[in-house]
Amino acid sequence: MTDDKRVYLFDSTLRDGAQTQGVDFSATDKATIARALDSLGVDYVEGGWPGANPTDDAFFAEPPALKRARLVAFGMTRRPGRSAANDPGQAALINSKAQAICLFGKSWDFQIDVALGIPQAENIDMIADSVANALKHKAEVMFDAEHFFDGYKANKVYTLDCIKAAHEAGARWVVLCDTNGGTLPHEIERIVGEVTAVIPGNRLGIHCHNDTENAVANSLAALKAGARQVQGTLNGLGERCGNANLVSLIPTLKLKTDFEIGVSDEQLSKLTGASRLLDELLNRAPVRNAAYVGDSAFAHKGGVHVSAVEKDPRTYEHIEPALVGNRRHFVVSDQAGRANVLARFRELDIDVAVDDKRLNALIDQVKAREFEGYAYDGADASFELLARRALGGVPGYFSLTRFRIMDDRRWNARGELVTESEATVQLDVAGHQRMEVATGNGPVNALDIAIRKALLPIYPALADMRLADYKVRILTPQAGTGAVTRVMIESADKDGRRWTTVGVSPNIIDASFNALHDGITWKLIQEDAPAGGSLTDPA
């Protein structure tokens, strides 16, 4: 094991993350993520594979200016039967504006024989030639040894010859890849320890996939054994089950080990924001129970837990949430007691006396409504409104007079099936009757658009509000199509706020309206909108 404790962070979100099913980055998305990673303090940002697709070509044609991180271009070793200097793939990497190159090549004899179908000695020559040629043009070159651990277990001598060829040719980092994600932590630690006898640990990296849910543990095991570069992605994005999650690795390394990483305390406090930025770009809901950065990572539901945390957070929190840009959160539910409600009030800056009789009434109301199907532990905004209403503090922004939904399913003149929903709403806004009609992709979307059309002229602060997630749960499946339905709606705005509201009704559209109404009302409270808005509106 090396004495040097400096660990270098290598992010491959822009390439490995792009291989995630359902993920499709634009060149602009890639630039935004790269700047966020640079701001976070990572050492290397792998931008993609120049020459592989138009998006990566556009990204490398005008790469973002990074202040600290090195931009890395990814590609393969030269092809068999030609020199590295005359290989088109090598030329694309060399001609890119990246400061460093990461070459990947095979290191498992099975892959050489079956996938490439070339002599094993030729593969070793390909590795050495490619690294040496790239170093003539770039200051830093590294080699990703694909399927390293499978190869090591099958034919240790040959696999070591592959990585020695890269090291001796001048590769700054030789990265050991658990490409199939099937190796376990004790194997990683043993094998990496053995490799350090051949290549110094301060020249070794680790690249783990998460197919056994061990990518983070495997990465830590490799570092313990001597490796000093760790590769991963934001939020663990990646092919199949994903890659090692840098959002977990970064705070773990900084706060829980004696390793040194190039991330300052201030940069670490941006971790939650960087994680959620990625989800926002992908239009995905953040994972609530994600370690360190999830909404539930520091959430406390049981009343006994809340009392203990208020006395000393260390009883149920392993770190201070603010260190990673997150916050402590007290959940109110049918398991809640007075401690939960009072703690939640303090979070909301609601001033109420401990002996206020309205507290008991509110607790009873929460428990009764959750019995009916409401779920406030996952709908903070709805609970806040329930509490403020109990204390008489919610303005009457608008009320529903009536709504009507019509669905139309038809074949158009071109023989195409068209399904469309139309919503008509009539609202009372400070004594003003407003009626709007809108069409949408489904009844809830049409209802949302129609309500927003009616309110926007009076409440322009709603312009940046959007629905980020919509969930439906059937609470009484035994009732069939007449079942009681719970709708959870997550909303978001340009300031990065996300809030969740809940509605319950035997009618799914009515339940959706209740959740929409709460979502809009919560947003208007945050914006300090006056009840009635701008009454100069002519309608």
Image (tube, rainbow, N blue to C red):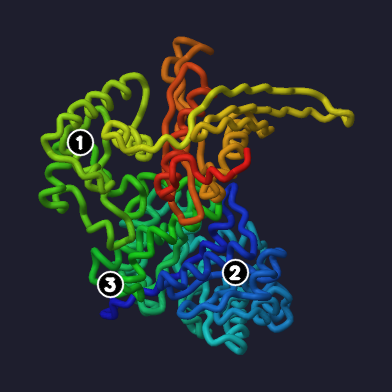
Which numbered tag is attached to residue 302? 1
Q: In the image, 450: left or right of 36?
A: right
**Callout 3: 10 Å neighbours few (<14), some, many (20+)?**
some
Q: Earlier in the sequence, mark 3 or mark 1?
A: 3
Which residue shows up at 89% across the image and 29% down it?
A: 413
Return the residue at label 2: 120
Looking at the rendered structure, the secondary structure element under dot 2 is helix
Q: In the image, 395: left or right of 402?
A: left
> Quarter of the image holding residue 417?
top right
Task: Please state the horizontal and vertical placement of residue 139, each as a whole percent of the image.
Answer: 54, 87
Q: Amino acid at mark 2?
A: Gln
Q: Amino acid at mark 3?
A: Phe
Q: CA distance from mark 2 to mark 3?
A: 38 Å
Foreground mark, 3 or 1? 1
Which residue shows up at 36% across the image and 26% down it?
A: 374
Looking at the rendered structure, the secondary structure element under dot 3 is loop
Q: CA distance from mark 1 to mark 2?
A: 61 Å
